Amino acid sequence: MTPSSRSDALCDWITENRITHQLWSRTVRSRRLARIYRYPVDFFPTTLMLAVFTAQLTILLFIDDPVHVIAAVVLLLGIQVNFAGMCHNHHHQETFRSPLLNRAFEVMMFLQLGMLPYGYTLHHNIGHHETYMDQEQDTNRWRRDDGSTMEPWAFAWVLFLNMYPDVIRIGRSHPAIFRRFLRMFWVCMAVLAIFIVVDPVNALLVFVAPLPAALLLQAQATHYHHAGLASDDPLRASRNDLDSLYNLRTCNLGYHTAHHLDPDLHWSRLPEFHAEIKHRIPSELIL
């Protein structure tokens, strides 16, 4: 059995299992959750993210041995980087109905992934989505000056090192969003300062040290979406990964052409949209 078939089998078991199927169905139709979430299905990823944040706080407050702290942080990092899909979706389509809950959620995501609130809006929504077919302007630029395509890790380092300089550059042209970015920057720094006062060593190990690695890993994971696809046709400018497990852990980021055609479409609806347009996408761009 190939890795792809194994992941498909796992996802089929999750979706077809009677207990998980009922849980999914009840959650999606829940009126109570609909009062909190714009899309109740977001209950699943946000609950997992809250569980990891609770684990982070537990490490901060109750583990004294730095070796044990580092081991726990490494284990959690392997889970945290999978939250990038939910972070991506949130900045296109806010998760909660309450603005206060959305801002609190963004602070938590910053502490797990390293992307500041509204930084994603400036860098990704504006800097990438509006220019991804123009390699002179794209903030996720994959083309070198000589026209060649960057390797995944070269791409990741360039994206990582230019991420916040690009946020500031784009922010100057979008002052209203940039002011929100700056306000939330200070909120995030205040939360970090509180954690540092509580336990300086643990705060640095749990909430500061992992962030560069988290950002770098997220950057590397986006390389294959567009690398080498120089086109002014949006149907030919993105690759699509239909692997079930990949889309389960990234909130359907594999349906990338559909996402670029309708960036504000909620992740749960991307497979349906992809099915409508897949006959127009070159077969070599559907993996």
Image (cartoon, grey):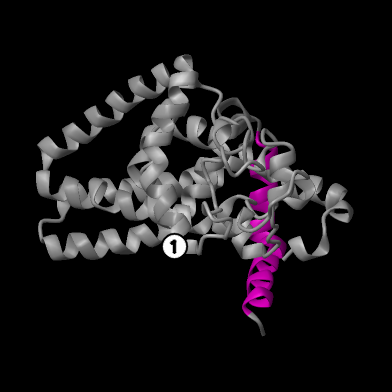
Q: Main secondary structure of the magenta part?
A: helix
Local secondary structure at mark 1: helix
Quarter occupied by the C terminus = bottom right
State left or right for residue 208 relative to residue 240: left
* x and y, in percent, of residue 109 in the image: 40, 40
In the rendered image, residue 16 lying in the magenta stretch gets the answer yes
Instruction: From the image, tell me which residue sits under label 1.
Output: 153
* x and y, in percent, of residue 257 in the image: 73, 48
* x and y, in percent, of residue 176 in the image: 47, 14
In the rendered image, residue 62 lying in the magenta stretch gets the answer no
Q: Which amino acid does the dot numbered 1 rest on?
A: Trp
Q: Residues within 10 Å of mark 1 (few under 14, many from 20)?
A: some
State left or right for residue 180 relative to residue 133: left
**Who is closer to the viewer here, 174 or 199?**
174
Residue visible at 66% across and 74% down?
4
Residue lying at the far right of the rendered structure: 279
Residue lying at the far bottom of the rendered structure: 1
Q: Residue 68's quadrant in the figure? A: bottom left
**Residue 105 appears in the figure:** no
**Residue 27 appears in the figure:** yes
- In this rendering, the answer to whether 172 lies above or below 267 is above
Residue visible at 69% across and 41% down?
260
Q: Residue 3's quadrant in the figure? A: bottom right
The magenta segment? 3-30
Residue lying at the far front of the rendered structure: 146
- In this rendering, the answer to whether 172 lies above or below 191 is above
Quarter occupied by the N terminus = bottom right
* x and y, in percent, of residue 128 in the image: 57, 39
Residue visible at 67% across and 63% down?
244
